[in-house]
Image (cartoon, helix red, strand yellow):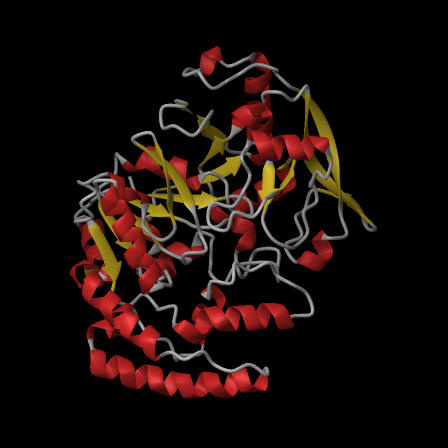
Amino acid sequence: MNTVVLGMQWGDEGKGKAIDYLAGSFDVVTRFQGGHNAGHTVYYQGQKVVLHVLPSGIFYPDCLAVIANGVVVQPLQLVEEIQNARSLGLSMQNLILGENAPLILPFHQQLDVVFEDSRYQRIGTTRRGIGPAYEDVVGRRALFVKDLLQEKAFRSKIAILADYYRRLFKAHGHPVDDIDQAIDQYLQAGIFLKPYIANAAHLLRRAYVEKKNILFEGAQGTLLDINLGTYPFVTSSNTTIAGVFSGTGLSPKAVDKVIGISKAYTTRVGEGPFPTELKDECGSMLRERGNEYGSTTGRPRRVGWLDLVALKYAVQVNGVDSLFITKLDVLDESAEIQVATSYESADGRGDDFFSHADALSRVRPVYQVLPGWRKNLGAIRRLGDLPRQVRSYLSFIENFTGVGVSHVSLGGEREQTIEIDR
């Protein structure tokens, strides 16, 4: 059964752990959008591993791990990530890098910094060049992974782009960094990556025709989608179900099931409205218990109660079939748990989610208070052994969103997951 795994919040929902838990039963795992601004945390042989671009399928040698064409690739970073994976004893022979994946070029990271510093309102970008790389795709001037394999053509194409960027940086009062050394490094990276480079779209179509089980791995979260998220505080790609098809080249018929990943509470990194944000001791406690610091940037995450209005919106946008609730154990010490069930604004009270930031920033959450359980859940392995208050909390989420909870994560390890039969 071909399955999509998507984040339901502002990213950092624990998709890495969820995908790693699921990946063992799939023939193919493919990442379809985003870049190395994402960070999926997985525990492998007792060791914490942060994946930025590599699909979680790399931990399963019989599973094809595909970086699809919708992903923007910084080749030097990818080389480093592959080398780190090899140091863990992974062969990496199951990795496929899409030849038509756009490159993050030396200009892009510099431009990301310039743009962020010149905005009237900071977005909170990771400054890794993701947005400018996608801008080049839309502007029809991008270079692609396959260009790294043709040195003469690559040097010619990037020289033309360099002239364009010199004029752009000059307009912003910034010089362009010297790129000669970077070009040589990129070409060396191309030599390293050559064994992995292939026509990812063709391989994925063939896997689908041959009825292989495919797991589609999303990065970031629904509320960061460029079209459907809290604009302008969003990422530069489609983090929702739409990104699966444009990123892989497969049709909607290729998807059998959609699993939405949500924390038992809510977090956000960077700027933008966050209706349920906690700025008190409770928020600090959840941040420390949940180790809420960015796996890519190290930035402390903003923390708040679960926003069911936003979660229901994400469920509906993506056609979610079931929810995978993560970090439920972080709430173990809370005597009471609040969940937002509607918003109040100047126009009254309602349960509609406002995706654009200016509208969302003007709402106030309306909470329903649920009892906590004050018990350590980490060692529990069966649904029936969960305290009654936990099961009531999960049922409340199910009833509000209209979809069932299929998995519950009670810690970082694979075995700290309860799969619920439906």
User: Where is 382 relative to 259, above or below?
Assistant: above
**Quadrant position of the N terminus in the picture:** top left
The quadrant holding residue 3 is top left
How many marks can you see?
0
At horizontal 32% and vertical 50% (from top left) the residue drawn is 54
At horizontal 36% and vertical 57% (from top left) the residue drawn is 245
User: Where is 321 relative to 299, above or below?
Assistant: above
> Residue 28: in sight, yes or no?
no
Residue 283 percent location from the top left of the image: 67, 35
Residue 196 percent location from the top left of the image: 19, 58
| Of 353 and 184, the residue lying toward us | 184
Residue 47 located left or right of residue 380:
left
User: Where is 28 relative to 413, above or below?
Assistant: below
Residue 183 percent location from the top left of the image: 31, 76
At horizontal 52% and vertical 69% (from top left) the residue drawn is 112
**Quadrant position of the C terminus in the picture:** top left
> Residue 285: in sight, yes or no?
yes
| Of 362 and 12, the residue lying toward us | 12
Residue 358 located left or right of residue 333:
right
| Of 224 and 345, the residue lying toward us | 224
At horizontal 33% and vertical 29% (from top left) the residue drawn is 46
User: Where is 216 relative to 418, above or below?
Assistant: below
| Of 160 and 372, the residue lying toward us | 160
Residue 220 percent location from the top left of the image: 48, 50
